Each structure stands twice: as structure tokens, then as C-alpha cells.
Amino acid sequence: MEHFKIENLTFSYPTSKDKKSLDNVSLKIEKGEYIVLCGKSGSGKTTLLRHLKTVLTPHGKRSGEIYFNGIALKDVKNRDESAKIGYVMQNPDDQIVTDKVWHELAFGLESLGCDQKTMRSRVAEMACYFGIQDWFHRDVAVLSGGQKQLLNLASIMAMQPEVLILDEPTSQLDPIAASDFLNTVRKINTELGTTVIITEHRLEDIFPYADRAIVMDSGKIIADDTPRNIGKLLFEQNNPMFTAMPTPVRVFYNADGDGDCPLTVREGRAWLNKEFEIKPQIAEIPCKNIDDDIENPALSLKELWFRYEKDTPDILRGVSLEIPASSITAIVGGNGAGKSTTLKAICGICKPYRGKIKVFGKAVNKFKSGELFKNCVSMLPQDPKSLFVKSKVSDELAEMTKDKNKINEVAETCQITELMNNHPYDLSGGEQQRAALAKVL
């Protein structure tokens, strides 16, 4: 028996009645399946997932029917839906409601009215299963993004749901934390038999283990097959989503491979060794060296030290850095390494207790109020929703400048021209990022 059965689901948001976010979607999801839902930003992935949880269903015009365990979803009792359908959101801070890790783990069970003995048992079990028992009594506020997302997953699984829905859960995690998180999701599916439905852009860690891959475009399902066959379908259609396929899949089809398509690096290596007995010569790409002494750097950091509270460890410890003008520089590191704190220090949001920051040769503390952000520095935060204060995307941009030509130019650059009349909160995660980028530009 299928867990979910979707029949002819069509949906459009109130501000975009002419555009269908979901267009006649029909789908069956069997018990115990691991389903990966993929597609470009704005293809309807998040909208579809939110329709599988009634409290998250967006407001708009809708037709069609959704069944859960053979019962119309709208007729399923709230308590049953809360217990049986788990949902992990894109932004971990949107879901955390308590101040301590142990209380967050118990919150869902408290809401379901579990007795104390069962609650203690399940919370302890999940803490050990996810390996988070060491931070049992810690404040949620001090956790990194990856730790918060793992806590969200553990809190949901403490209620022992039948279905686990995850909406781009690794979008704010570093590669190592994301890989660990996705491995945990796979373990939940294989060991506990939980049905998993996940939207994700990091397909390398998901495709080899998924039972089915579903590709969406413009609110429609354009492909629904096994991961091995999906790559072939997208390649033959010359679909842009083929570029998002795992590396072994792209190498295989671009090299006109025959037989079964490799999904993992191991399978890809075996196919290459069989196909090419003589190893091909690999051309070395020259790397441009960065001079130790940069003349007139756009940004200069010298010995930055910063901590959030007086009695807490330093987050930044002697950070020194020079960035040349007209360059692209990446700051990398694990969750909690201090990347975001460094950016906030540059913008004056976090004020280091020691060290100097110069922008184009001028100390940050010498800029007048607001002067730093006029044709000088702009910052796109991790959560784009923190920038949105208006009811339309066009109004968000108009808040920054009244120059209509400039607004149109930036909207076209960021590919949001068609979204200008939408409410920012009705956009997908990727569309929100582009709208926020347009606003700071």
C-alpha cells in the first residue's frame, strides 16, 4: 500500500494566478521508499512537499487530491499527522522552539501527550542514535548550523514518524556536515524502514542509494524513474538538469558509455579502468600565485579577536587577511569555524575587541553612519528572509533605490524579472536567494 497518493494536484499562489506552481501533478510513494526530488529553483519542489503536511500548505488556489495511507490528507487527524509525518525545513532556525537540546528532543513528544517514561526512553534512544548525547544539556543558541539541523532531525525521529520529508536540509551546511547528515538520513531509511522524501542539490551523496528520482520543471513532473535511468533521460532530452547529476553519470554519458551507468565514484573508476586500458594524460591547469604583499588591498584584516560573550571562547583568534580589489575570495571551513563571524566583523555587525579592519585603506570605525554601505560594502546574509520587509519583490528593490532602470537591470541580472509581483515568502529557496542578492546589489 502506498504512503502517499497524489491525484491531479494543481496549485497557484494568490499573487501569481497566471502561473501554476504545481501543474496537474500525479504521484505515488510506496512505504519504505527513498525518493529524491530534484529540479531547478522555482520548479515547484518545496510547494509540493508543503502540500504533504497540512499545517505547512501555502495559501492559494488548489485543485486535486492527496491521500495518506488511503485516507484523504485533509481528513487525517492533526495528532496522527503530527506523529506520522515528519518534516525537516531548509533553515534549521525556523524549526527550533526551545532553549536546551534535551528539551528540543522532548518537545514533540510533550505535544503528543506521551507519558514521562516513554518520553525519557525515546529521547535517550534518539540522542544515542544520532550521537548527540554529549551536547544533551547545551544551549541550542551555541550550536552550529549543522548541529542544529541534526538536532531537528533527531527531534522529528523521536516521534517515530512513518514518513520523513526533508526540504533541502543541507543548503546551509558545509560539505562534511552535509555528507554526515545525508548518511544519517540513509541509515534511518535502511535501518528503521522510514519512508524518505527529500529535495536536494547535492545528488552525489543521494543518487546511489535512492529508489527513485523525480525531476520537476515549471510545476510538472518531467521524469520519474530509477537514478540509473534518470541520467539517460535528461541527457537525451538535453535538459539543463543533467548538469546537476553526479560526476560519474555526466562523465559516462558525455563519453558515450555503454551498459549500466555508474552512480558512485567507485563504479565510475571501475568503468574508466575497463574502458581506458591506457590511462589518458591529464593536462595540468596552471595556478596563479597570489602575492604576499598586496598593493592597495580592497580589504585588510589585522589580528582580529572576537567572542560573543565575556566568559565564552574566542570565535576569531588573530585573523589576518588581505584581499585584492576586483578579485573573488572564498572563506572555507567547517560549521562553527568563524566564517560568518568574520564577514559580520567586516560589516561592523560584530565588533572585535582587538584588531583593525580597513576597507579601501580606511578604517571601518572611521566611516560615518551608513557611509560604509554606500557604493562600498554590501553583505548577503545566510538567511535571505532576514532582508525582506515588503509584500512584493519589486517593493524590496524600490526600498534601496528609486532608479527604475537600475532596478530593471539588477532584476534581469539576477533572473527575477518574472518574480517582481510575488511576495518574497512565496518564492522558493533559490529564488529568495536571488531576490536578496538583487536587493543588496
Image (cartoon, rainbow, N blue to C red):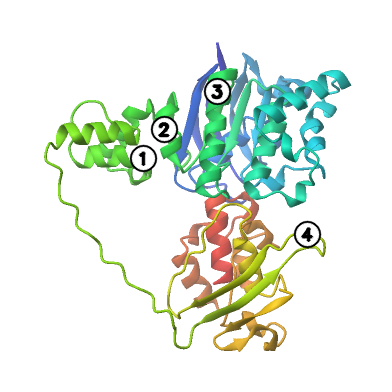
Say which mark, if any, is on residue 177. none
* Identity of the residue drawn at 66% across and 27% down: 129
The amino acid type of the residue labelled 2 equals Phe
| 2 and 1 marks in contact (CB < 8 Å) | yes
Instruction: Please tell me which residue is depicted at 70% across the width and 24% down the height of the picture.
Output: 74
Figure disc tally: 4
Residue receiving disc 3: 189
Q: Position of residue 431 (x, y in %)?
A: 53, 54
> Which residue is rendered at x = 78% and y = 59% of the image?
312
Q: State the image coordinates of residue 192 (x, y, percent, origin top left).
A: 60, 18
Q: Residue furthest left?
A: 278
Residue most extreme to the top: 1
- Rounded to the nearest angstrom, the CA distance separating label 3 from label 4 is 38 Å
Task: Reply above or below: 346 against 196.
Answer: below
Secondary structure beneath label 2: helix
**Residue receiving disc 4:** 312
* Residue 277 against residue 159 in the figure, above or below: below
Q: Nearer the viewer, residue 191 or 79?
A: 191
The location of residue 325, given as percent across then percent down, is 45, 81
Which amino acid, by three-letter code, is at mark 4? Thr
The Cα atoms of the two marked residues, 2 and 1, are separated by 8 Å
| Left or right: 368 in relation to 3 | right
Q: Residues within 10 Å of mark 4 (few under 14, many from 20)?
A: few
Secondary structure beneath dot 3 equals: helix
